[in-house]
Image (tube, helix red, strand yellow):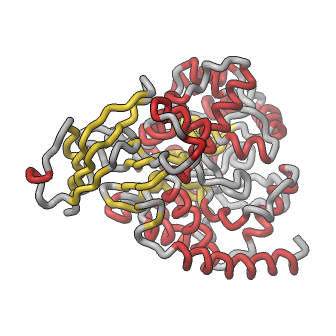
Amino acid sequence: MSSYLLKNCDIANFDTLGVSRKDLLITGERIALIRDRILPAEHPDAEVIDVNGKLVMPSFADMHTHMMQTFLKGPMDDYPITDWLVRLFSIGDLFDEETAYYSALLGCLSSLRFGTTTINEMADWIHFAPILKAFEDSGIRAVIGISTTDIAENDKTPLISVEEALYRSEYVYDHAHGKNNGLIEASCAPAGLPACSKKLVQALKQFADHRGIIFHTHLAEGRKETEDVRRMYNLSGEGEALYQFGILGPKTVLAHNIWLSDAELDRIKETGANPVHCPNTNLKISDGIAPFAAMQKKGINVCFGCDGEASSSTRDMIREGRMGAYLQKGVTLDPTVFDAGYVFKAMTKNGPKALGYTDLGEIKEGNLADLIIVDMTDDLSLVNRDYRIGNLLYAGDGHAVDTVFTAGKIMVRGKHLTMFDEGKIIETSERLLRKLNDKIRKAGL
């Protein structure tokens, strides 16, 4: 069992935006002790790491991902949403197993490099096996479900029956839940209304409740789709539809949440559902601006997600949080909303809470040792130690992350992955991308 003694940590306090200098002992997968001073002689088996006053904080939870889209930065840029969706499915058909594996692996490793140790994935059924293997090999903490649809939004929408959706959910549960010593869990992850019928989402929610797993779906991402739902069910919107269908609850995770009324926000608050802010995607593909400042004021458990890189182009949660903060300040004309402390809690504590963890997302004795060490000493734009937390959000990015622990295991050290040769990952990815780009061109896409 590995043990690490981290000396001279400046542990971040997101309430005060200050720090407290402490020593921290990690034993196995958990934080064993936090003290003003811990003597190495008291724990002779622990590797001593002098943090030397660097910032220590919980790692990030990326609460809405499509990791197989990592290879699609570039080919998906600057398309209208209708064309974007058709193009996404069309290019996805060109992926073979090796391409799917390395695309997902690259996404996981980029996440780890930028301080994210937990992801909530909505995956592709056809490539489920290589995607799952990528999660296992990366060592990231993941919740994975399969995107399912049974109503066509375009001629490329993959349609399946409710029975097939339940079979796939059972398969994912049997093959993923508890993998990697519990780092990987299963979810139900239908794509969302209007591409999913009432019967489908209710059947999958019943399955999720029976298994005690997360229900993860898109909500009110597009204006047209929201209008379609209103017409289909004669209800005020997608949020109201999910409420009436019995889908909303504390184990429900909702991505995007743009076209929602204030009454629908009250439904989310009432049920304890967990909305995920994906601002880079929402801006880049022109979905709109979600009312997350209103959710903050209502005390809703707001989370953040980088979505797929086909739409967001990033796995950097600090960039995601900054964009989300600026958007909410700009649209409300209120500089006090989405302050730095609130945003960091949304990126660290709220995600694990939505996934059902009670021992993750905070630097506390007994908690799982998912944490990061941030080095801001080598960046000219990040000087001023008295304001490190705010400056990290508003002026920094994930490249400031120096060390990453997942369940007490060092995944990144000295700003480099410990388990992988980054040069070889890049070389292999470039080779596969050249092949994929050739396929895209030959297909006339």
Q: Residue at x 79, y 32 (%)?
A: 230
Name the foreground residue: 438 vs 91: 438
Q: Residue at x 52, y 64 (%)?
A: 109
- Is the C terminus in the top left, top right, bottom left or bottom right quadrant? bottom right
Can residue 188 be seen in the rendering of this structure? no
Q: Pinpoint residue 351: horizontal percent, then vertical percent.
A: 48, 40
Can residue 67 be seen in the rendering of this structure? yes
437 lies left or right of 430 = right
433 lies left or right of 210 = right
Q: Pinpoint residue 159: horizontal percent, then vertical percent.
A: 72, 60
Q: Residue at x 68, y 57 (%)?
A: 309
Name the foreground residue: 253 vs 34: 34
Callout count: 0
| In the depicted structure, whether residue 185 falls above or below residue 330 | below
| In the depicted structure, whether residue 366 falls above or below residue 109 | above
Q: Pinpoint residue 412: horizontal percent, then vertical percent.
A: 43, 61
Name the foreground residue: 232 vs 123: 123
